[in-house]
Image: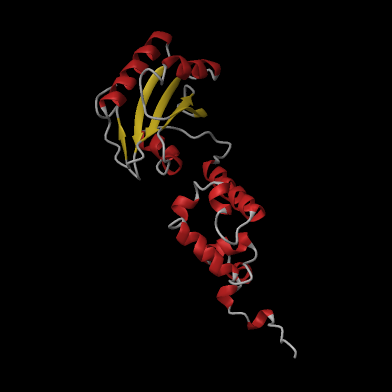
């Protein structure tokens, strides 16, 4: 008994994402097809596109996939350590490319500029991250650093940590930002207290706190615009 080999041309085009990418370009491929290319192969029982679809369904789309761990990936049938590592590397590379800015330093001219700079990364975080943007005299970003991860608290987000980095970077001013994982950027009393404390410390050492942005899901609140600075 002989078994006929299925030639590549006999495989439906939707199951040949690499050919579709070459022919049409990556922007025309679905999330499932792009994942299938990264995964490379399926299992004995299912095609790579089926595996990619199951991966998407497991994480309810690419939004949660971007925060996955190697343990979560390898727990999925058909994804071993090699595929999991490749997926994580691709996800991290995508994040870094999104954060990349050209040699011309990013200039903050308004609260919207500051929010745009951090929004895509911060709006999907599952924990609160307190981030500082350190600016020069032209309001160009010199450096961005996460100072603290966890619920915002004045006793934990200490001005010493913020302004130590500002002095190190020879910053003229700073903008602080933190996210609300709930997606609602309405500032809390603790947010306001931290803002006023940082502003007072900044005045004493000559490094102005220009704004404190609370990042929600595709929306933000400027505490300066709210009159707290």
Q: Quadrant of residue 19?
A: bottom right
Query: How many labels sit on residues?
Result: 0
Q: Write the residue at 34% across / 40% down.
A: 216
| Residue 145, image x, y percentages | 50, 28
Image quadrant occupied by the C terminus: top left
Q: How is the image coloured?
A: secondary structure
Q: Judge whether residue 30 can be spotted in this image.
A: no
| Residue 171, image x, y percentages | 49, 20
Q: Quadrant of residue 218?
A: top left
Above or below 128: residue 190: above
Q: Is residue 219 left or right of residue 89?
A: left
Q: Quadrant of residue 126?
A: top left
Above or below 1: residue 186: above
Residue placed furthest toward the top? 204
Q: Judge whether residue 78 can be spotted in this image.
A: yes
Is residue 83 or residue 110 the one in the foreground?
83
Q: Write the residue at 65% across / 66% down.
A: 41
| Residue 96, image x, y percentages | 56, 43
Q: Write the residue at 54% across / 39% down.
A: 101
Is residue 29 or residue 73 the one in the foreground?
73
Q: Is residue 103 left or right of residue 174?
A: right
Above or below 20: residue 123: above
Residue placed furthest toward the right? 2
Is residue 170 or residue 120 the one in the foreground?
120
Is residue 3 or residue 217 the one in the foreground?
3
Image quadrant occupied by the N terminus: bottom right
């Amino acid at each position: 008994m002989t078994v006929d080999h299925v030639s590549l041309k006999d495989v439906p085009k939707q199951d040949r994402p690499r050919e579709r990418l070459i022919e049409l370009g990556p922007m025309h491929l679905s999330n499932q097809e792009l994942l299938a290319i990264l995964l490379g192969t399926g299992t004995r029982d299912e095609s790579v596109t089926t595996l990619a679809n199951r991966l998407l369904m497991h994480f309810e789309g690419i939004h949660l996939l971007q925060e996955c761990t190697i343990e979560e990936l390898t727990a999925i049938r058909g994804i071993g350590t090699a595929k999991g590592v490749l997926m994580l590397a691709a996800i991290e590379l995508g994040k870094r490319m999104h954060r990349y800015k050209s040699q011309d330093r990013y200039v903050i001219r308004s609260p919207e500029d500051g929010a745009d700079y951090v929004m895509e990364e911060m709006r999907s975080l599952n924990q609160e991250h307190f981030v500082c943007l350190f600016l020069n005299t032209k309001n160009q970003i010199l450096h961005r650093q996460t100072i603290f991860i966890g619920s915002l608290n004045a006793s934990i987000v200490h001005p010493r940590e913020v302004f130590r980095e500002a002095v190190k970077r020879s910053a003229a001013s700073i903008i602080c930002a933190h996210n609300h994982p709930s997606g609602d950027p309405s500032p809390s009393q603790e947010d306001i207290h931290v803002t006023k404390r940082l502003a007072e410390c900044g005045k004493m050492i000559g490094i102005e706190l220009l704004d404190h942005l609370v990042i929600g899901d595709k929306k933000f609140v400027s505490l300066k615009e709210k009159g707290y600075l």
